Image (cartoon, rainbow, N blue to C red):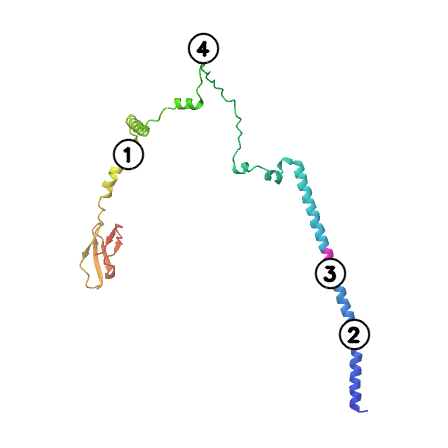
Amino acid sequence: MNPQDLEIATQLAGAAGLLIFLLPLIGTFLLLLLLLAAWRVAKWTRSTREALDVLNGKFDQLLAAVEQEQAVAPSLTLPPLATMEEAPAAAATGEENFTFEAGPEPVYAEAAPEPTPEENEEGGAEPPPVEDVLPGPEEESAEETPAPPEDAEEAAEEATATATALREESLPAQPWEEAAEEEETEAPAESFQPPPAEPMASRLPDDPRKPGVHLARCEQCGHKLAYKEKMVGKKVRCPSCKEALGLP
């Protein structure tokens, strides 16, 4: 047998021995992992059950409190939905059904038939008295309702105009009305007043020692102003009298 074969066989035997030694360790480790997972699942299940028991207890307490409040104040309970569904449609639209009972109809007397001349001659009896016939409701309304005048609208307008004129003549003019009229008459006159003239500054001869600097005098107080050429035409405030001036 070659030395190489022996070496290979020795290596295989060592690997097999190592594997045989590691298999129990691996099995033990897997068993521990399985036990740990089972313990975690059991612990999670127990904690979940306890939380559910607490929630169920609180829910039962709330139900008991609600039932107690309903027993103490039964008038606050809402009516069942069936009564609302059985309500008539007229209640939803806000209309009310009224039943009118027919009263006794008026009795109108009928005119008796007039006897013929033959019956008067044969019987010789006097004719029955003529009864008064009550007019019907249509006839009464036709007789009592007067015809509307043709110029009713014109008469109403004339009456309104007359009443307005009498009220204006009888009531004196109120002071606030007179003040409003005076303000209206005075407002146009005030609006056309010309604006006050702005104070101007008069130009002075320039100083040859300072080229580019202009001199001016305020017409209001006589204060002298010195300004650069780029300020020409702009408005400034006089440092003495505080008036707005247009620089010449």
Q: Which amino acid does the dot numbered 2 rest on?
A: Leu
The percent position of residue 60, horizontal first and vertical second, equals 70, 45
- Regarding residue 128, the answer to whether it shows in the image is no
Q: 10 Å neighbourhood of mark 1: few (<14), some, or many (≥20)?
A: few
Mark with earlier residue (3, 1): 3
Helix, strand or loop at label 2? It is helix
Helix, strand or loop at label 3? It is helix
Write down the residue under mark 3.
41
Mark with earlier residue (1, 2): 2
Query: Which label sits on residue 206?
Result: none
Q: Is residue 185 above or below residue 217?
A: above
Q: Which residue is drawn at 78% across and 70% down?
A: 28
The magenta span reads 38-47
Q: In this view, does 142 lie to the left or right of 215?
A: right
Query: Which label sits on residue 179?
Result: 1
Q: Locate the N terminus and report the quarter of the image it occupies.
A: bottom right
Residue in front for this viewpoint, 217 or 5 = 5
Q: 10 Å neighbourhood of mark 4: few (<14), some, or many (≥20)?
A: few
Q: Image quarter for residue 225?
A: bottom left
State which mark lies toward you, 3 or 4: 4
Mark with earlier residue (3, 4): 3
Q: What is the total number of numbered labels drawn onto the structure image? A: 4
Write down the residue under mark 2.
23
Query: Which label sits on residue 120?
Result: 4
